[in-house]
Amino acid sequence: DTGVSQDPRHKITKRGQNVTFRCDPISEHNRLYWYRQTLGQGPEFLTYFQNEAQLEKSRLLSDRFSAERPKGSFSTLEIQRTEQGDSAMYLCASSEVGVTDTQYFGPGTRLTVL
Amino acid sequence: KQEVTQIPAALSVPEGENLVLNCSFTDSAIYNLQWFRQDPGKGLTSLLLIQSSQREQTSGRLNASLDKSSGRSTLYIAASQPGDSATYLCAPCSTLGRLYFGRGTQLTVWP
């Protein structure tokens, strides 16, 4: 069990560009979550999946954001037409509902929009 | 909307002290509550999870309590060490699985 992994770890982009992040959960975890954390704040929930179904989306997730988990394994988070306000750490977590419920977090992807 | 407050915001203590970190939340309809630590620039490490039906959970030098009806949780750290220096985050979990976070308590333990 290698834990939750995220790729890339750092991304620098120019305003207006599209970016995509990947998250690989702990194998056999049926839930996958995305959170966003800005400097000095706690993480904020963005969305989560149970298997391949996206069950909840925060109002923080504007139309420029889209997330997928096509086969119920890894997930991608895409941000279109990035803005400077999108600069943050994007965190992914996974859990096995009904077994432990503990959410295990990955190392995060640090996004900087210039 | 669930609001989470952690007190104190920062704490600096000498090695060996016993510590109490406080967390309060506004909506008592939670499924469970997790405590995490976060080192600078890193992801979150899960420390303890307390189910809503439990009052207490222990792991090594850490003990967390939960009073769901009053919206409070406490993390007790015994015999603190410099390696405990980090930000500690409390996160009540909704029945839908969403974690809500406060700003955390930034702990510094000096030798």
Image (cartoon, grey):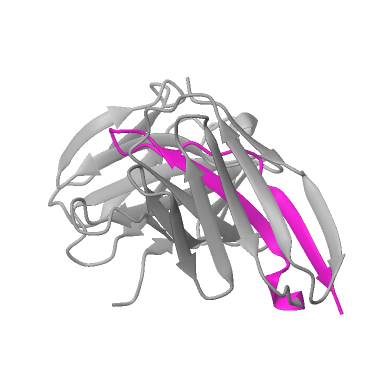
Q: Is residue B94 magenta?
A: yes
Give whichever of B28, B111 is nearer the camera: B28
Q: Which residues are magenta?
A: B82-111
Image quadrant assignment for residue B22 = top right
Residue B56 spot, x, y in % from top left: 45, 55
Q: Is residue A73 left or right of residue A26?
A: left
Q: Is residue A84 left or right of residue A99?
A: right
Q: Is residue B47 magenta?
A: no
Give whichever of A3, A17 is nearer the camera: A3
In this rendering, the count of numbered labels is 0
Residue A50 spot, x, y in % from top left: 18, 43
Residue B28 spot, x, y in % from top left: 43, 28
Q: Is residue A83 left or right of residue B68?
A: right
Residue A88 spot, x, y in % from top left: 60, 43
Is residue A16 visible from the viewing direction of this image? yes
Query: Considering only vertical position in the picture, is A4 above or below A33?
Result: below
Image quadrant assignment for residue A48 = top left
